[in-house]
Amino acid sequence: MTALLTLNDVTKRFGGLQAVGHMTFSLNKGEILGLIGPNGAGKTTIFNLINGFYPPTGGSILFKERRIDGLKPHTVCHLGLARTFQVVKPLARLSVLDNVMVSAFSRTNRRDEAEKTALEATAFTEMDAWRDVKAGSLPLGMRKRLEMARALATKPEVLLLDENFAGLNPTEVESTIEIVKKIHASGVTILIIEHIMRVIMSISHRIICINYGEKIAEGTPREVAENQQVIDAYLGVA
Amino acid sequence: MSRKSLIALLPIAAVPLIPLLTQSPYLLHMFILSLMWIVLGQSWNLLGGYTGQISYGHAAFFGVGAYTTGIMVKSGLSASTAWWGLLLGGLVAALVAGVIGWICFRLRGSYFSLSVLALSEVLRIVAVNWNRLTNGAEGILLIPAFNTKTYYYYIAFGLAAVNFGVIRWVMHTKPGYYFLAIREDQDCAESLGIDTTRFKLLSLLLSAFFTGAAGAFYMNYMGFIDPGIVFSLPDISIMVILVTMLGGAATKWGPAVGAVIFILVSEIFRVWVGSGHLLFFGVLIVAIIIYFPSGIVGALMDRRARRRRLSAVPAA
């Protein structure tokens, strides 16, 4: 197993508040790694550190054996690391297809190639019927899916999924699970943040649980689910 | 192309023929000013409408373009700058824009808007006081190179057409998509691989280039500039925003529609009420903002889109 993405002792402080502390883990090529933890545990902050929105206060982040901490998000994206946003960010006044074309342009300068990639990505995420709709008027389920289509169109090696299941109805959850599995089967390594346990337990190969910005457990879904510290973090200590 | 859009294009096809139809200096003057304002509106629209970077100081680029050609002629470096002066004026304006953009576009929010406003005011004060270079508040007076307005008409038409064509082309390619993405959400744009600083700068350079070229045209056509005219905050910087908003920001034809209406309204009311014409234009703007917040062309497009949307949304 080769580590595609590695966090080494990564710390992020906002003033006196430590959002992430001494975080160390690796994402291996070809796996789906789940990141769980209570609200405010620092999961999205970890994504923002990897993606380049924040520089870490300490530690280093390696992607394909190259340091990426301190790089700008657009550079990280070009290296092959894409993300979705928990709070969806559709380019509201652009159509779904144009949204995806914007991200497809990260790999080409040609309009026809970008359009081809965008058509593939919307088909892959089963959004064909919505292509011409303005992103701002999409229902939430489709906005979440647009996040995935856009991330895919940048042709990433690693995909960071930030709560793409939150707020979906049961049918949408099922179809999104299928899409994530399809993305994984196409050779993309996935790091996923998710609150819906049924989802994270069924698709992750490994899970890391964090609380107050620190790692409290790591292992297979079953190991993590039975870990006393994890249970305490979620339910409180009796 | 549908028959309807062909009919809509007919009046535009007639624009180059206007000097053949009328030789009236007054009418030609109106058309020339309209064309110049179309260039200003379209250029501001590229940066403000499409890229979402609001400039409160486009007079800076207009004035720099005008003064560049004015100084070239006055200092005896060139006898006439009616043609290539537009290019030079545009380039110098883009250079100034490059400096301010390079500094400000690392930041988001209103830093750029306010910096460029300050820049235009600073340049105006410099132009008033740097007597040896700019002839100060007295301004620069040139003898126009051509003595009929027809030449200027075609120069202005050429500039507006090139400006329109370049913007259409840019908006159809990668940078255009990136401009829109930056306007909609900069965080999202960054994470989709867009170097936002670089593309905001590119939009500004194009916008400033054409604004500077329009300034250079103004110098050559009017034959007289002073700092109060070309670096004017109300008459250039603010007016170009109003013209664009009136017609419709971020629309293809909005700036042109806005420019023509602006010149028309200004002239009608100038005849009636003298310098009170700006008051009427102001009232018109207020009415447009209340009843058609996305401008005249924007409102028409919204109406069409609403009709189409009824059939566009698929069953979930």
Image (cartoon, coloured by chain):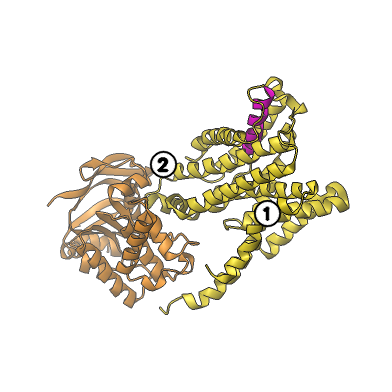
Residue that mark 2 sits on? A15
In the image, residue A104 lies in the stretch drawn in magenta:
no
- Which amino acid, mark 2? Gly
Residue density around tag 1, few if under 14, some if 14–19, many if 20 or more, within 10 Å = few
Where is residue A30, by image quadrant?
bottom left
Q: Main secondary structure of the magenta part?
A: helix
In the image, residue B73 lies in the stretch drawn in magenta:
yes
Quarter of the image for the C terminus of chain B: give it. Answer: bottom left
Say which chain tag 2 marks.
A
Q: Quick check: B262 above or below B70? A: below
Query: Magenta region: which residues?
Result: B58-75
Colour assignment, chain B: yellow
Residue that mark 1 sits on? B17
In the rendered view, does A12 fall on the left or right side of B106? left
Front in this rendered view, residue A160 or B77: B77
- Return the x and y of residue B164 as percentages of the image width and height: 57, 51
- Return the x and y of residue A120 as percentages of the image width and height: 31, 64
Q: What numbered label is drawn on residue A205?
A: none
Front in this rendered view, residue B65 or B289: B65
- Label count reads 2
Say which chain tag 1 marks.
B
